[in-house]
Image (cartoon, helix red, strand yellow):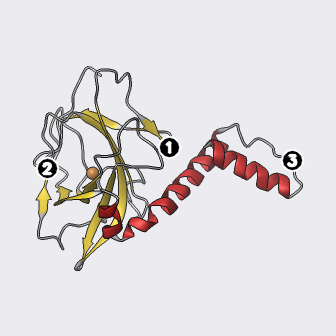
Amino acid sequence: MTFAKSARCAFVVALGLACLATAAGPIAAEESQKAQIDALRKAMEKYQDYKVAVRDLYLSTVGCIHYAGEKIPDHMVYAKGAMGVHFVNLTIKGPPDPMKPNVLIYEPVGKKLKLVAVEWLVPLTPDTKEPPKLFGETFMGPMEGHEPLIPKEFVHYDLHAWLFKNNPLGMFAPTNPSVSCKNSDFALLEKPTKMIHGH
Ligand SMILES: [Cu+2]
């Protein structure tokens, strides 16, 4: 964020104009978030080839996850739509890094896998004081692990970002109705995940 702001200041100064009001106000904050998202998209572009992702230890969890839009009290609400195939990197640890998501999400399109989104998956620990935030977005959760691919004991927060496929529900919505698992032999219809209270 600081980098984006100072880069823009440098640009404005180079044009011979005063560098005004870049640090303050909701418009400046929004613009700096947009710049940060653009930088992230650029950094993630190499993973459009899933083999590059695997070499960097983002490993496929095989199942193509989708939701029916079912609502259950005390459970997370996922609009009808899919996420896709999650490739998880367990070597990325610590607080969520906006430039280093620990999950990449692919949509099976024909016989190919297309990179559509990234995700930050953050375990709930005894020293978690509040839900993590990135790009001004508060993470969803805490919630149980998503069965059947993640044990339900894995209580966590998560945030999705649809960097490579437009999501009509918004950039940070968990499911994308434009994504489909119909081309996957490993489609998994997931039930909404249970919320954890008291955090
Ligand atoms: Cu996901």
Q: Amino acid at mark 2?
A: Leu
In percent of width and height, residue 168 lies at 38, 60
User: Of the residues shown, which amino acid type is indicated by label 3?
Assistant: Ala
Which amino acid does the dot numbered 1 rest on?
Phe
Q: Residue, x 35% and y 71% (percent of image)?
A: 49
**Viewer-nearest residue: 97 or 25:** 97
Q: Earlier in the sequence, mark 2 or mark 3?
A: 3
Q: Residue at x 30, y 57 (%)?
A: 58
Which residue is labeled 2 in the image?
149
- Residue behind mark 1: 135
Q: Secondary structure at mark 2?
A: loop
In the rendered image, which residue does mark 3 sit on? 18
Image position of 71 with respect to 178: above or below: above
User: Is 120 located above or below residue 175 in the figure?
Assistant: above
Measured as percent of width and height from the top left, residue 74 is found at 18, 32
Sequence-wise, the earlier of marks 2 and 1 is: 1
